[in-house]
Image (tube, rainbow, N blue to C red):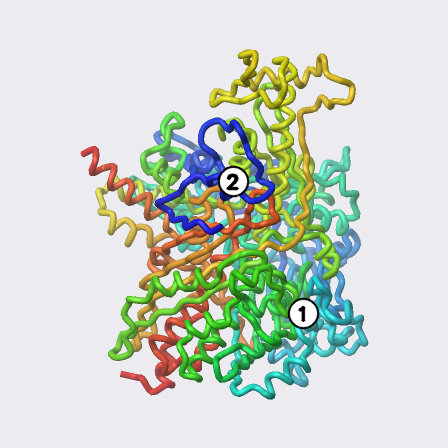
C-alpha cells in the first residue's frame, strides 16, 4: 500500500493561524490533537455519536471526527482551549465546576463547545438541555450536573441582563 | 445515628455523629471539611482542556508525514473468527513496508513473553494463567499479533497486509448452550479432567465457598455458597409456596468514554520500562507485566495520568496491553496504542452475563423460608485474572437485606466463544439484586400479597444488627426498612394506570452493597491472591505544604478531592494546602486493588484519617517545643499560625515545618522526616445500603418505557463530600438505567459474531433516557472504619434494572411473568405485549 498523499493545511484555531502538513486522510480531530498539540479535543468513538470531539467550525458545533482536516482548510475553528481567557474560566465552565457537571472529564470539552454555541445563539434552557445536550453521551454523570450548570447560567443571565 | 441529608441541606458533620476513631480536633481552623460539598480541586484544569489522559501524552509526536517521530504506534491483529486454530501467520509483505517497525505473531510473542498470572480461581478451575500467544482463538477480537509502525494510520494499513489463516471450529454462544450435551468444547484438554476441587468443606465464618466438583465440558468450575443444597431442598420441598423463575442479566460493555490506552517506553541502556496506562490498578498491572515480560518489578514503572472513566474495565492487565509493552521492549523505543471504539466494544473485556434459576419458598404468612439460586456465569473464552469473581459474589450476596431460614447458591462458571468477562461496577451484587427482587415481586403477585409488605416482613431489622447471613456475610449497621419505606413513600401518590395504551406503574426495592473491600484475611480464606490493605502517607514539606500519597487512583470519582478533604480536616488546614499524588508505582503506596470495589474512601481514607491524626500530633508537639509550652496548650488558627495559650507566643505552620525538617535541637529518639505513614487493613466488610423507587410509563403500541421519576435513598455512612457522593449515585443510577433499558453486548447465536460493534449498536443512556434522579442520603456511620465511612461507588447501579422491571410489571401485570431479563428494549417489551394479547 502506498503512503497516503500529504497536504499543508492552514486554519485559524482559537484566533491564531496555524499551519501543518498532514495526510489527506487525517481527521480534523486527529489533526488538532496530533499535528497542533491541542489535546483538549477528545476522541471517544470516531463515528459521530458520543460528541466528545465537538469543536466550533465557523461558530457552528461539528464533530471533528466526522470531517477531514483538509476540509477545514481556511476555516475558523474554536476548541476547548480557547474558552478560558488568561486562565479565567468562562461562566459556563465555572457553572460546570460549581454544579459538579463533570466526573472523568473526557466528554466535557465537547459538551462545553456545544453549550457555548447554544449560549451564543441564545437558545432557551429547554432547547439546550433537550436538543443540544442530546448530541452528547456522558458515561459518568447521568447528565444531572450538566443540566444544573445550564440552569445556573440561565439564572445568572436573568440576574445580569 | 442516622442523619437525613439532602442535597440542599449539607451541614458539616457534627462531632456527635463522628464514628469511633474519628477523634476530636480541638482547634480545627474554620469549618470542618469532612461533610462539606466543595468543588473538586482539579476541575478547573479539566475544564480548560488541560486534562492529560494517556493518549494526550506526547501527542504532538504522533503524526509526522515524513516517516514518523520518535513515537511508534501499534495496531493489534485480532481474530475475525469466534473459534478456530491459527494455521498460518505470514507477515513477509507487511514487514517489507517501509513504515513497518515491527510485526509479531504467536511465534515471536511466545519466544519473548510468558502467560499472565491469575489471582482468583474458583474451586475446580484448572486454568491458572492467561495465554499471551494462543494459536487457538476462542472469540472474535482475540489478539494474535501486533504491528508497530511510524503512525497509527500506517500501522493499521500494514495490519491489513498480514496474512493469517484459521481452521474454523464450531462455536458456542451463551452459558446454557455451552453447558448442553454435545456442545463444542473450548478447552478440551481440561474438559474431562478430574480437576482440583479447591477449598472444600463447610463454609467457614468468612464465607469461603465450597467446591462442588471437578471441571467438565465447558464448565470451568463450580462452587456452593450458603447452606448446602440438600438443606435448602428439604425446606423448599416442604414449603406451602415456591416461586421459580429463569432470569438473566445480559453482557454489557464498560464504555468508559476514554478507551484503554498505553504509552510504553523501553530504554535499552538502563533496561527500564516506563509506561503510562489508563489502568485502575497500576501495581497489579506492573506485577502482571513483570511476569509476562520476564522483568524484575523494579524495572517497570507504571504511571496513571488522568483517567477517562473505569467502571471496572481497567482493573486487569489485558493481553493486548502486554503486547504493546513487549513491542516497546523489542524495539527499544516508545510505542503508543489507544484502542478504538470498536475494540473497546468487542476486545475489551465485558461485564455481567449471568443466567440464573432462582426459587423462593414462602410460608402462608409470606415469611421467606428458603432461597436457592443456580447461577451460570458467562466467562467467555477464558477466565481473566479474577475470572468468575462476579459470579461468586452474586452467589455470596444472593440473600441481600433479607432473612431466610435457609439460603444458598450454586455458581457455575462457563466457557463460551465470546470475549471474556470481568469486574463491572456492581460486581455480582447488581445481578443478585435483580434476581432476588424479581423473584420477590413475582412471589407477591402469585400469592396476591402487596410486594412492599412482603419485603418489610422479611427485611433484616436495625435491631438485629450485626446480622450474619446464611452465606456468612455480617452486616454491620443500617436501617433497611426505613430506607425502603422512604422509597415507597416517594412513589406512593403517583399514578398507576392499568388501562389505556399508555400504562403507568411504580416500584421500590432495597439493596445492600459490600464496601471497603476488603480484609486481607478474608482474601486469604477465599484464596484470592491479593491483599486488601492500603497505606496512607502524609508529608509536610519544608515550606509547610502537604503532599498526600495513596494507593487509590483518580478516574473521575473525585477521590483526589475527597482524600484532600480528609487530610485537611484532620490537620486543620485549608484545602489549598493539600496536594494528592496517586497512581505511580514508583512513588505511591503499594495497592493490589487501588480504586475499585467501592473501597477508596473506606480503606485509603481510613488510613489517611489515622495518618492525619498522627501528623497533627507531631506538628503540634513540634510547635509546642519551639514555643516552649505543652502540646495541649497549642492551637492552630485559621491563618495557619500556632498559638501557645500560656505564653501568647506564635509561630506559623510553615515555620514549624521548616524548623522541623532542619532537625535542630531535637531529642535523639525523635524522627526528623515529617512524614507519617499508616497501613490500614479493614477488619471487616462494611455494608452500605439503599432503597430506590421509580415511576414508569409503558407505551403498549411501541414498547417504549419512559422513566417519569426516580428516587434513591442511599446510606454510605459518613459522607466526605456530599456533592461528589450525589454525583456518584446519580451517575451509577444512569448506568443502571442503561442495563435496564438499552445496553446489551450481544452475540449472534449462530455465528458467534459480536453484534454491538459501535455506539450505533451499543446504546448508552442518552440525556432523554435519564430523568432527574432525586437523591436523599442518610448517614449511618460504619462502626469500625476510621471516620465512619462506607463506600458508595457501586451502590447506585444495583437497583435500577430491577426497579424499572418491577415498575413495568406493575404497569402491565399481563406481561409480568415474562419479564425475566434485561434490557427492556422497545422491541422486547412490544413483543411481550403482543404475546400477551394486548395488541391495540
Disc 1 versus disc 2: nearer the observer: 2
- Report which quarter residue B644 is drawn in: top right
**In the drawing, what numbered circle is on residue B166?**
1
- Residue at x 77%, y 55% (from the top left corner): B114
- Residue at x 29%, y 74% (from the top left corner): B503
Q: Can residue A70 be seen in this view?
A: no
Residue B297: x and y in percent read 76, 43
- Residue at x 59%, y 29% (from the top left corner): B547
Residue B152 appears left or right of B143: left
Q: Is residue B541 above or below residue B445?
A: above
Decide which of B697, B201 is in the foreground and name it. B201
**In the drawing, what numbered circle is on residue B541?**
none
Circles 1 and 2, Cβ within 8 Å, touching? The answer is no
- Report which quarter residue B164 is drawn in: bottom right
Decide which of A122, B629 is in the foreground and name it. B629
Residue A26: x and y in percent read 47, 45
Residue B245 appears left or right of A63: right
The span from disc 1 to disc 2 (Cα, nearest Å) is: 51 Å
The residue that mark 2 highlights is B562
Q: Can residue B415 be seen in this view?
A: yes
At mark 2, the secondary structure is helix
Residue B236: x and y in percent read 59, 84
Residue B396 appears left or right of A64: right
At mark 1, the secondary structure is strand
Q: Earlier in the sequence, mark 1 or mark 2?
A: 1
- Residue at x 71%, y 57% (from the top left corner): B523
Q: In this view, does B832 lie above or below B567?
A: below
Amino acid at each position: 500500500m502506498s503512503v497516503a498523499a500529504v497536504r499543508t493545511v492552514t486554519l485559524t484555531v482559537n484566533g491564531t493561524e496555524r499551519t501543518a502538513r498532514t495526510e489527506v486522510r487525517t481527521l480534523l480531530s486527529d489533526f488538532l490533537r496530533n499535528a497542533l498539540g491541542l489535546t483538549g479535543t477528545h476522541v471517544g468513538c470516531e463515528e459521530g455519536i458520543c460528541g466528545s470531539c465537538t469543536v466550533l467550525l465557523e461558530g457552528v458545533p461539528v464533530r471533528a471526527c466526522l470531517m477531514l482536516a483538509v476540509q477545514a482548510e481556511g476555516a475558523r475553528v474554536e476548541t476547548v482551549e480557547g474558552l478560558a481567557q488568561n486562565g479565567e474560566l468562562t461562566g459556563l465552565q465555572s457553572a460546570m465546576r460549581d454544579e459538579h457537571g463533570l466526573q472523568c472529564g473526557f466528554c466535557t470539552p465537547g459538551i462545553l463547545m456545544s453549550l457555548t454555541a447554544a449560549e451564543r445563539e441564545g437558545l432557551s434552557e429547554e432547547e439546550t438541555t433537550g436538543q443540544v445536550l442530546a448530541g452528547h453521551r456522558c458515561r459518568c454523570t447521568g447528565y444531572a450536573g450538566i443540566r444544573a450548570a445550564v440552569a445556573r447560567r440561565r439564572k445568572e443571565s436573568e440576574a445580569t441582563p | 445515628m442516622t442523619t437525613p441529608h439532602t442535597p440542599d441541606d449539607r451541614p458539616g458533620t457534627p462531632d456527635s455523629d463522628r464514628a469511633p476513631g474519628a477523634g476530636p480536633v480541638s482547634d480545627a481552623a474554620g469549618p470542618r471539611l469532612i461533610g462539606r460539598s466543595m468543588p473538586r480541586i482539579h476541575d478547573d484544569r479539566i475544564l480548560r482542556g488541560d486534562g492529560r489522559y494517556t493518549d494526550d501524552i506526547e501527542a504532538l509526536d504522533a503524526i509526522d508525514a515524513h516517516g514518523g517521530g520518535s513515537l511508534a504506534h501499534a495496531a493489534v491483529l485480532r481474530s475475525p473468527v469466534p473459534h478456530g486454530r491459527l494455521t498460518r501467520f505470514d507477515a513477509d509483505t507487511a514487514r517489507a513496508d517501509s513504515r513497518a517497525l515491527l510485526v509479531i505473531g504467536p511465534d515471536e510473542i511466545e519466544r519473548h513473553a510468558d502467560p499472565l498470572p491469575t489471582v482468583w480461581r474458583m474451586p475446580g478451575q484448572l486454568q491458572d494463567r492467561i495465554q499471551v500467544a494462543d494459536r487457538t482463538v476462542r472469540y472474535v477480537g482475540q489478539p494474535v499479533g501486533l504491528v508497530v509502525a511510524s503512525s497509527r494510520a500506517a500501522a493499521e494499513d500494514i495490519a491489513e497486509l498480514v496474512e493469517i489463516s484459521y481452521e474454523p471450529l464450531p462455536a458456542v454462544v451463551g452459558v446454557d448452550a455451552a453447558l448442553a450435551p454435545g456442545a463444542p468444547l473450548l478447552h478440551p484438554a481440561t474438559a474431562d479432567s478430574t480437576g482440583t476441587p479447591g477449598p472444600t468443606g463447610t463454609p467457614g465464618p468468612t464465607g469461603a465457598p465450597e467446591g462442588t466438583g471437578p471441571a467438565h465440558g465447558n464448565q470451568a468450575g463450580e462452587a456452593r455458597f450458603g447452606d448446602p443444597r440438600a438443606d435448602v431442598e428439604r425446606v423448599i420441598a416442604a414449603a406451602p409456596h415456591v416461586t421459580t423463575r429463569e432470569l438473566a442479566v445480559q453482557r454489557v460493555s464498560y464504555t468508559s468514554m476514554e478507551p484503554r490506552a498505553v504509552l510504553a517506553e523501553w530504554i535499552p541502556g538502563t533496561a527500564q520500562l516506563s509506561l503510562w496506562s489508563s489502568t485502575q490498578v497500576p501495581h497489579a498491572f506492573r506485577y502482571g507485566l513483570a511476569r509476562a515480560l520476564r522483568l524484575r518489578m523494579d524495572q517497570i514503572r507504571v504511571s496513571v495520568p488522568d483517567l477517562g472513566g473505569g467502571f471496572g474495565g481497567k482493573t486487569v492487565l489485558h493481553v493486548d496491553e502486554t503486547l504493546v509493552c513487549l513491542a516497546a521492549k523489542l524495539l527499544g523505543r516508545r510505542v503508543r496504542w489507544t484502542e478504538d471504539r470498536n475494540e473497546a466494544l468487542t476486545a475489551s473485556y465485558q461485564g455481567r452475563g449471568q443466567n440464573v434459576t432462582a426459587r423462593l419458598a414462602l410460608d402462608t404468612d409470606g415469611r421467606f423460608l428458603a432461597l436457592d439460586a443456580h447461577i451460570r456465569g458467562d466467562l467467555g473464552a477464558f477466565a481473566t485474572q479474577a475470572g468468575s469473581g462476579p459470579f461468586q459474589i452474586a452467589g455470596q450476596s444472593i440473600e441481600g437485606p433479607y432473612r431466610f431460614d435457609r439460603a444458598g447458591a450454586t455458581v457455575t462458571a462457563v466457557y463460551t466463544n465470546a470475549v471474556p468477562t470481568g469486574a463491572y461496577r456492581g460486581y455480582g451484587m447488581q445481578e443478585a439484586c435483580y434476581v432476588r427482587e424479581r423473584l420477590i415481586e413475582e412471589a407477591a403477585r402469585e400469592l396476591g400479597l402487596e410486594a412492599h409488605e412482603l419485603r418489610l416482613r422479611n427485611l433484616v431489622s436495625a435491631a438485629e444488627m450485626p446480622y450474619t447471613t446464611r452465606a456468612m456475610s455480617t452486616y454491620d449497621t443500617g436501617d433497611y426498612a426505613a430506607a425502603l419505606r422512604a422509597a415507597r413513600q416517594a412513589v406512593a401518590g403517583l399514578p398507576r394506570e392499568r388501562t389505556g395504551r399508555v400504562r403507568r406503574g411504580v416500584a421500590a426495592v432495597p439493596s445492600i452493597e459490600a464496601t471497603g473491600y476488603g480484609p486481607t484475611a478474608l482474601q486469604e480464606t477465599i484464596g484470592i491472591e491479593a491483599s486488601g490493605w492500603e497505606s496512607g502517607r502524609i508529608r509536610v514539606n519544608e515550606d509547610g505544604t502537604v503532599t498526600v500519597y495513596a494507593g487509590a487512583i483518580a478516574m473521575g470519582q473525585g477521590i483526589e478531592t475527597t482524600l484532600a478533604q480528609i487530610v485537611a480536616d484532620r490537620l486543620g488546614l485549608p484545602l489549598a494546602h493539600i496536594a494528592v499524588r496517586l497512581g505511580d508505582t514508583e512513588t505511591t503506596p503499594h495497592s493490589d486493588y487501588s480504586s475499585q470495589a467501592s473501597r477508596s474512601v473506606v480503606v485509603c481514607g481510613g488510613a489517611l484519617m489515622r495518618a492525619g491524626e498522627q501528623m497533627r500530633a507531631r506538628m503540634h508537639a513540634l510547635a509546642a517545643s519551639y514555643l516552649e509550652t505543652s502540646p495541649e496548650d497549642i492551637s492552630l488558627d485559621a491563618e495557619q499560625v500556632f498559638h501557645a495559650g500560656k505564653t501568647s507566643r506564635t509561630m506559623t505552620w510553615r515555620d514549624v515545618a521548616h524548623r522541623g525538617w532542619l532537625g535542630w535541637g531535637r531529642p535523639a529518639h525523635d524522627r526528623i522526616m515529617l512524614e507519617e505513614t499508616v497501613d490500614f487493613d479493614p477488619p471487616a466488610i462494611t455494608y452500605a445500603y439503599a432503597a430506590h423507587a421509580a415511576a414508569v410509563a409503558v407505551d403498549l403500541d411501541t414498547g417504549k418505557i419512559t422513566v417519569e421519576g426516580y428516587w434513591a435513598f442511599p446510606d454510605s455512612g459518613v459522607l466526605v463530600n456530599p456533592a461528589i457522593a450525589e454525583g456518584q449515585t446519580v451517575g451509577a443510577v444512569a448506568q443502571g438505567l442503561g442495563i435496564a433499558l438499552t445496553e446489551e453486548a450481544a452475540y449472534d447465536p449462530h455465528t458467534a459474531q459480536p453484534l454491538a460493534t459501535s455506539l450505533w449498536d451499543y446504546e448508552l443512556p442518552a440525556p432523554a433516557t435519564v430523568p432527574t434522579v432525586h437523591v436523599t442520603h442518610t448517614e449511618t456511620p460504619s462502626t469500625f472504619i476510621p471516620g465512619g465511612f462506607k463506600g458508595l461507588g457501586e451502590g447506585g447501579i444495583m437497583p435500577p434494572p430491577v426497579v424499572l422491571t418491577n415498575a413495568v410489571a406493575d404497569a402491565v401485570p399481563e406481561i409480568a411473568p415474562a419479564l425475566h431479563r434485561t434490557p427492556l428494549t422497545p422491541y422486547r417489551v412490544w413483543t411481550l405485549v403482543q404475546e400477551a394479547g394486548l395488541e391495540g
